[in-house]
Amino acid sequence: MKYLSNKKGFLGTDNKSNNKENVVVIPFGLEKTVSYGGGTNKGPREIIKASHQVELFDEDLNKEPYKSIGIKTLKPFPIKKNIVDALKQIENINKFLLEREKFPLILGGEHSLTSGAIRPFVKKFGKICLLHFDAHADLRNSYNGNKFSHASAIRRCLDNKNVSVISFGIRNISLNEMSFLNKNKNRINIFWAKDKSKWNLDKFKKMIKNKKVYLTFDLDGLDSSLMPATGTPEPGGLFWDETINIIKMAAQYSYIVGADVNELSPIKGFDTYNFLAAKLVYKIIAYSFEFKKIK
């Protein structure tokens, strides 16, 4: 696998920082099943570009996390044209990295990528808890005739019996998805957006404690006033501080072993949204590694 130079990769750090990589950022602009707004194939490029403006010092952790972590970015590569082949492609990339004890961080691309990305984590760790941020439940068995649709991303992950899901921010779900949810409440827990004021995060801590966690973040989980640059924006969503608090809590109480951030559809001339996505990625990486050593 070939890496971008540090200067051209995620965060755009000085080429003098030659730490051995623990995190590998994977630009994977998969766009095969989008059903409303498009442009997610441009998401990885714009996130990397915006990341060069992200302040490297983290005021919460009181340090520059990247220095002790080591972050490299894969050079962009062609994505397979067929959705099944593309999912196998990202599966193989993650398998290669996990065999070398790396932390894969995928920049999407549409959310359908997660069902391929998570497979080698299940093989390596046995059981995986999927920490899922999204406006949509993504529990449809198929959408527009495609069972690998972005609207079926979490359902396909649950095809593996060793995967459980904790979702935050859900505010769009179909009748058929509700039926599936009600039959699988032992594996799916949803913190509904409408109930934010009543969320019991102590319950969340107990649910996630000491589990191996794969974090998947669909950017439409954020409120559409904060993140309109996504294919299917929804009002009534998550805001920055509460989102970061949940991610930090997850890192403190569980073992985050990999992640993806997906569904950015860049809007020309509005770099703010790309920057938000880039800062979110840096926060996920920083918290995931900060709390590994204290559990």
Image (cartoon, rainbow, N blue to C red):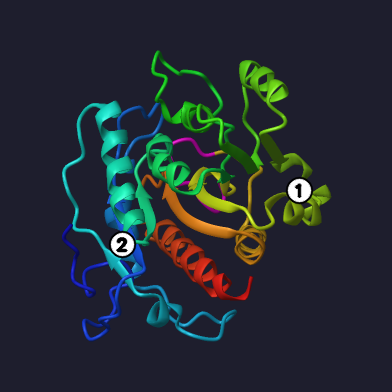
Instruction: Give the magenta-colored segment's residue range.
Output: 224-233
> Is residue 268 among the parts visible in the rendering?
no
Q: Seen in the image, is 195 located left or right of residue 146?
A: right
Q: Residue at x 44, y 58 (%)?
A: 277
Identify which residue, 64 or 135, lies in the foreground: 64
Expressed as whole percent of the image width and height from the top left, the position of residue 151 reads 48, 27
Expressed as whole percent of the image width and height from the top left, the position of residue 87 reads 32, 34
Expressed as whole percent of the image width and height from the top left, the position of residue 9 reads 25, 67
Inspect the magenta stretch and tell me whether residue 140 lies in it: no
CA distance for labels 2 and 1:
31 Å
Q: Residue at x 61, y 38 (%)?
A: 164
Identify which residue, 140 or 170, lies in the foreground: 140
> Badge 2 local density, few (<14 within 10 Å), some, or many (20+)?
many
Q: Determine which residue is flagged by label 1.
A: 196
Q: Type of residue at label 2?
A: Ile
Expressed as whole percent of the image width and height from the top left, the position of residue 215 reads 52, 51
Task: Specify the farthest residue to the top.
Answer: 145
The quarter of the picture where the N terminus appears is bottom left
Q: Determine which residue is flagged by label 2.
A: 48
Q: Seen in the image, is 264 located left or right of residue 250?
A: left
Q: Secondary structure at mark 1?
A: helix
Q: Type of residue at label 1?
A: Lys
Inspect the magenta stretch and tell me whether residue 228 lies in it: yes
Q: Quadrant of residue 19?
A: bottom left
Q: Quadrant of residue 269?
A: bottom left
Q: Residue at x 33, y 55 (%)?
A: 99
Circle number at residue 129: none
* Picture layout, residue 119 above or below residue 205: above
